[in-house]
Image: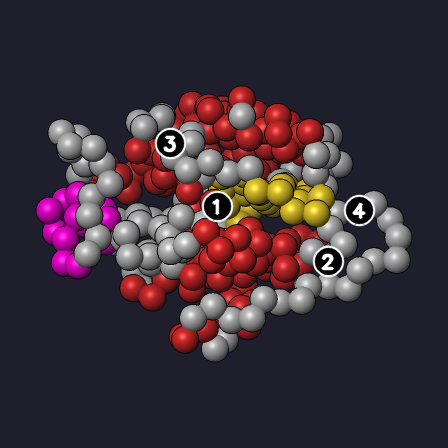
Amino acid sequence: MISVAIAAACAGCAGGPPPLPTGPPIPEGGQPVVYAALGASETVGTGLNDIALRARFAWPQLFFNMVLPRAGTYYNFAVPGITTAAALYSEVPQALAVHPTVVTVFFNIDDLVNGVSPTDFGTNLDAIVHALRQDGRARVLVGNAPAIDSLPAFKACQGQATGPAHCPLPAGITIPPQATVDAAVDAYDAAITAVVAREGATLVDVRAHSDVLTTNPEDIAADGLHPSPLGDQMLAALFAAAYTTARRG
């Protein structure tokens, strides 16, 4: 199901972003759909090279177009570089103020870079998801963390740069050994899985597609860290497939 959704979303995109999907038809009645996206730079659309492109092709916009009614409302509250601790006091209140019925949550790399322990990350994420679920009134989809050791920016931090990507870490900060980073990502993903199960949310298994999202040059932006337009399409397809599968279940 996921591979089919990805193939459909990415068909014909070698020459640039495809036309935007039209989305499902406008429903005749029922509760209006309000979609809120929470996250950091990936959710903002960092990696897309201009503001207009971000507005149309950041993955939350594509997700909205793929599976939610045209009569719905979309809000993107993501902030580049934000951690889960900060999002609790900025993004979450803004999202709750619009009474969302569908929410996507995608936090990982910025907490890792800031040295947030897996335990604290899990505690913060649990508070975020618990609040957004609104006692079951909203469907919340949570993306896990992809493996990052193949990203060009990560390799640049290790002194293995082979292209235009540069290390995004401030001068003087040394990146831990690869095994340590891999273990931290594993621990974050375990925390995400536990939160999803505990709070009745839906897991979006981004980690399972790391081999494409973080190693295929066409899916990675020029900065070597964020998704390219093709990578944004794949992320949107993963969230859309998880949403559709959970809805049918």
Label 4: element kind: loop
Q: Earlier in the sequence, mark 4 or mark 1?
A: 4
Determine crowd level at label 2: few under 14, some 14-19, many 20+ residues with C-alpha closer than 10 A. Answer: some
Residue plotted at (28% across, 42% down): 182
Q: Earlier in the sequence, mark 2 or mark 1?
A: 1
Determine crowd level at label 3: few under 14, some 14-19, many 20+ residues with C-alpha closer than 10 A. Answer: many
Label 1: element kind: helix
Q: Earlier in the sequence, mark 2 or mark 3?
A: 2
Determine crowd level at label 4: few under 14, some 14-19, many 20+ residues with C-alpha closer than 10 A. Answer: some
| Magenta region includes residue 9 | no
The answer to whether the residue labelled 4 contacts the one labelled 2, judged by CB atoms less than 8 Å apart, is: no
Q: Is residue 187 above or below residue 206?
A: above
The answer to whether the residue labelled 4 contacts the one labelled 3, judged by CB atoms less than 8 Å apart, is: no
For disc 2, the marked residue is: 70
Question: Can you see residue 221?
Answer: yes
For disc 3, the marked residue is: 111
Q: Earlier in the sequence, mark 4 or mark 3?
A: 4
Residue type (three-letter) at the residue carrying disc 3 = Asp
- Which label number is shown at residue 43? 1
Residue type (three-letter) at the residue carrying disc 1 = Thr
The answer to whether the residue labelled 3 contacts the one labelled 1, judged by CB atoms less than 8 Å apart, is: no
**Of labels 3 and 1, the one closer to you:** 1
